[in-house]
């Protein structure tokens, strides 16, 4: 990326420099042309070539860099990349075309300027002018000879006519003699009549003509204007008109045949000089046009080369771009992609055919792999469906103890919701007891697993497979609890039966002894009274214990009626508030509390037992605080929160007492208690009542110390039919 950035900066600087150089050289060229335009001088060949090259080089550089930029843009639009090969081809072709063009322009400009300087030099101009002067001097000399002869002949005629008339017999001979001796070809005496027409008075013409048709009105007008003679010449003759007698309007016309070659050479020399002078006056314009044409031709040639280079690069690189795009599509999963470009006998066609064969093979193999993978996915989905349908937890681990598979039952039993996917993690990290059982090499066993403070009892079986082990286990915690409850129910029934039978006779006998012998005992009567009251009180305590045994052993089936759970909860809370004013009680209701189906007596019994346990926990905390002699004042606080759920009512009782014991998972088991005089049946009875009402009971440590006991009662406990017998 850094190299590309540096390259882009370099070419950007080149473009800027080329534009600045072109502007500067264009300005300098116009200044040089303007400076020399006033005197009409040519620019020297060196100066012209320098200005042309100095202007053309940056212009060609701009064209080449423009071609490179167009190549970059086309490459970006085609494949979205830098297109280095595309740019390199265009740049190289453009440079290859620009360098020879520049050399040809330099040579042509120098050659043209040298030729111009030679042909328009002072020596060339002098040579043409001398030749023209020589030709004109020869022809003008012939004209002067004719004019002199005409003047002399007119003088002779004037002398002759002063003595004789032209009608004399000797005049024709005299006239002929004058024409022959003066080497004239034709002569005539003309007189202008009153009508302005010329009439021939005498003529000598070897051709036999009898008029002077060569005399023009302009010649007559000029002679009448005072010219001593008028000479006109053409390619055939030199004619002169001289006045003999102006008053009588008598004129002498003479002519001599001219040298045709001399005349034509003179005219040609004159035309050449005239054309040379015209060309000289336009030489700077031609010089400018030639250089401009050369400049434009060079730019057009390089521009055409850039265009052809772009076309050539497109033709050569486009198949590569198509191949790259096809490779990208194949890489993205389109294995049916084929290159539709050139498939001829050249290298690109060979590459395209090889690519198409490769993609066809990949497509075929991919279809086979997809089919096999689909079968594997279907088989895996079937196995996962089977694993998810069983109630046992199933875990598959490899030889290193890494979890490869775990069904939802195993995840719900072993993992917390906050734990991410277990696959790929060591089993020793997720469930250390199961890993320890695997390490022991036993095929089965019973393990205790602590899940967020809840102790679970798992029955585990281990089987080996080709890659590791498969572990199946079931949660038998509830099963063991039910077995213990059934056993303790039988024990409680037997104990209640065995203890209850002698309690009544003992109480009656003690009361009778107290009534009969109270007055007869004179020594320590108070001691007698204390002993009898103690017996009666202890018998009452034993009776209460027997009643709890009986309630646990034979808890009556609930009779469900529509009741207001909030009112029942408030009644139980009110009794505790009246009995314990030293404790702060708080009640909170969340949401709409629905009417539920419950046994009013059992619901109140459950609330009372849980509130009683909360009060006892607060009392224990008071004793603990007093024993520790803490300076922080302590006041018991019990909060009852009732909340309406979707299909249940949740009652949570939170205290700030001593908190849960270490074996919190066993506190709902019969005869498990932390109180000195407790029977361990209160929470067992509450749990049984809650279960009969289609709910569940949980224990959690409250924030800041204490315990939260949450009881969940179903709105309609008869909905699943589990308590139909109770309803009856």
Image (cartoon, rainbow, N blue to C red):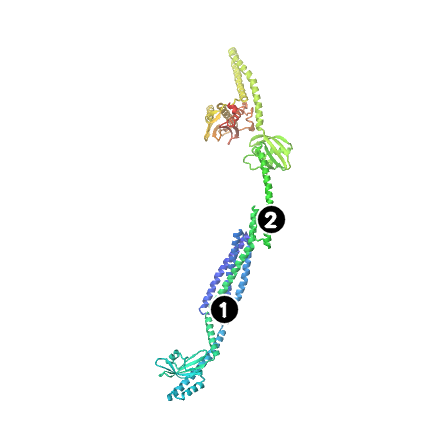
**Left or right: 603 in relation to 410:** left
Badge 1 density bin: few <14, some 14–19, many ≥20, Cα 10 Å: some
Q: Is residue 534 above or below residue 368?
A: above
Would residue 251 appear left or right of 386 to someone viewing this image? left
User: Which residue was labeled with disc 2?
Assistant: 358
**Label for residue 664?**
none
Does residue 10 lie above or below 108 as drawn?
above
Foreground: 709 or 427? Answer: 427
Residue extending furthest left?
194
Q: Is residue 57 visible?
A: no
Which secondary structure lies at badge 2?
helix
Question: Disc 1 designates what residue?
Answer: 44
Can residue 536 be seen in this snapshot?
Answer: yes
Tell me where residue 139 appears, x and y as whole percent: 46, 79
Q: x%, y% of residue 230? A: 40, 80
**Residue 728: where, in percent of width, then height?**
51, 22
> Compared to 433, does 61 lie above or below?
below
CA distance for labels 1 and 2: 68 Å
Image location (x, y in percent) of residue 551: 53, 21
Asked if labels 2 and 1 touch by Cβ distance under 8 angstroms, the answer is: no
Q: Residues within 10 Å of mark 2 (few under 14, many from 20)?
A: some
Q: Nearer the viewer, residue 315 or 416?
A: 315
Q: Secondary structure at mark 1?
A: loop
Quick one: label 1 or label 2, which is nearer the N terminus? Answer: 1
Number of callouts: 2
The residue located at (53%, 65%) in the rendering is 106
Q: Residue at x 53, y 66 (%)?
A: 107
Pick whichever, 406 or 274, lies toward us: 274
């Amino acid at each position: 990326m850094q190299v590309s950035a540096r390259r882009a900066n370099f070419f950007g600087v080149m473009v800027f420099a080329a534009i600045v150089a072109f502007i500067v050289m264009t300005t300098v060229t116009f200044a040089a042309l303007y400076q020399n335009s006033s005197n009409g001088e040519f620019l020297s060949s060196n100066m012209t070539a320098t200005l042309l090259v100095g202007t053309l080089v940056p212009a060609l550089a701009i064209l080449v860099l423009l071609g490179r930029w167009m190549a970059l843009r086309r490459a970006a639009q085609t494949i979205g990349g830098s297109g280095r090969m595309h740019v390199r081809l265009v740049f190289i072709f453009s440079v290859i075309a620009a360098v020879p063009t520049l050399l040809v322009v330099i040579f042509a400009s120098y050659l043209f300027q040298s030729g111009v300087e030679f042909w328009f030099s002072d020596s060339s101009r002098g040579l043409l002018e001398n030749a023209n002067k020589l030709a004109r001097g020869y022809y003008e000399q012939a004209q002067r000879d004719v004019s002199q002869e005409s003047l002399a002949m007119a003088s002779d005629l004037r002398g002759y006519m002063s003595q004789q008339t032209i009608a004399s017999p000797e005049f024709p001979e005299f006239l002929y003699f004058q024409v022959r001796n003066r080497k004239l070809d034709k002569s005539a005496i003309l007189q202008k009549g009153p009508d302005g027409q010329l009439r021939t008075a005498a003529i000598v013409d070897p051709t036999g003509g009898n008029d002077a048709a060569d005399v023009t009105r302009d010649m007559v007008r000029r002679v009448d204007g005072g010219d001593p003679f008028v000479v006109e010449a053409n390619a055939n003759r030199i004619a002169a008109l001289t006045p003999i007698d102006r008053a009588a309007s008598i004129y002498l016309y003479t002519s001599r045949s001219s040298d045709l070659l001399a005349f034509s050479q003179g005219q040609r020399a004159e035309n050449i000089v005239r054309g040379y002078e015209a060309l000289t006056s336009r030489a700077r314009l031609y010089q400018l046009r030639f250089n401009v044409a050369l400049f434009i031709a060079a730019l057009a040639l390089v521009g055409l080369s850039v265009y052809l280079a772009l076309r050539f690069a497109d033709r050569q690189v486009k198949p590569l771009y198509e191949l790259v795009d096809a490779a990208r599509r194949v890489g993205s999963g389109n294995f049916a992609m084929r290159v539709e470009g050139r498939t001829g006998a050249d290298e690109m066609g060979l590459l395209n055919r090889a690519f198409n064969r490769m993609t066809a093979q990949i497509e075929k193999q991919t279809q086979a792999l997809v089919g096999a993978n689909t079968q594997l996915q279907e088989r895996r989905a079937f196995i996962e469906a089977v694993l998810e349908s069983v109630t046992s937890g199933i875990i598959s681990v490899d030889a290193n103890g890494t979890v490869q598979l775990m069904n939802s039952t195993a995840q719900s039993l072993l993992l917390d919701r906050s734990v991410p996917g277990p696959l790929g993690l060591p089993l020793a990290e997720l469930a250390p007891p199961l890993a320890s059982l695997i390490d022991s090499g036993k095929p089965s066993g019973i393990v205790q697993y602590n899940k967020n403070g809840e102790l679970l009892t798992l029955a585990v079986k281990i089987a080996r497979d080709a890659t590791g082990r498969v572990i199946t286990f079931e949660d038998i915690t509830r099963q063991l609890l039910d077995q213990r409850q059934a056993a303790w129910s039988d024990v409680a029934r037997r104990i209640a039966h065995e203890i209850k039978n002698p309690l009544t006779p003992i109480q009656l006998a003690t009361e009778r002894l107290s009534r009969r012998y109270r007055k007869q005992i004179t020594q320590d009567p108070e001691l007698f009274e204390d002993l009898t009251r103690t017996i009666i009180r202890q018998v009452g305590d034993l009776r209460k214990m027997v009643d709890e045994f009986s309630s646990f052993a034979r808890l009556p089936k609930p009779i469900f009626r529509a009741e207001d759970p909030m009112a029942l909860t408030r009644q139980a809370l009110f009794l505790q508030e009246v009995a314990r004013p030293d404790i702060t009680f708080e009640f909170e209701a969340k949401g709409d509390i629905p009417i539920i189906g419950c046994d009013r007596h059992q619901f109140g019994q459950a609330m009372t037992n849980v509130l009683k346990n909360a009060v006892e926990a607060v009392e224990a905390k008071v004793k603990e605080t007093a024993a520790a002699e803490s300076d922080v004042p302590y006041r018991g606080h019990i909060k009852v929160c009732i909340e309406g759920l979707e299909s249940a009512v949740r009652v949570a009782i939170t205290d700030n007492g001593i908190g849960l014991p270490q074996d919190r998972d066993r506190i709902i088991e019969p005869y498990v208690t932390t109180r000195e005089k407790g029977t361990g049946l209160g929470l067992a009875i509450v749990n049984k009542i809650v279960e009969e009402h289609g709910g569940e009971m949980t224990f959690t440590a409250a924030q800041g110390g204490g315990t939260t006991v949450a009881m969940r009662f179903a709105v309609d406990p008869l909905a699943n039919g589990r308590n139909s017998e109770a309803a009856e």
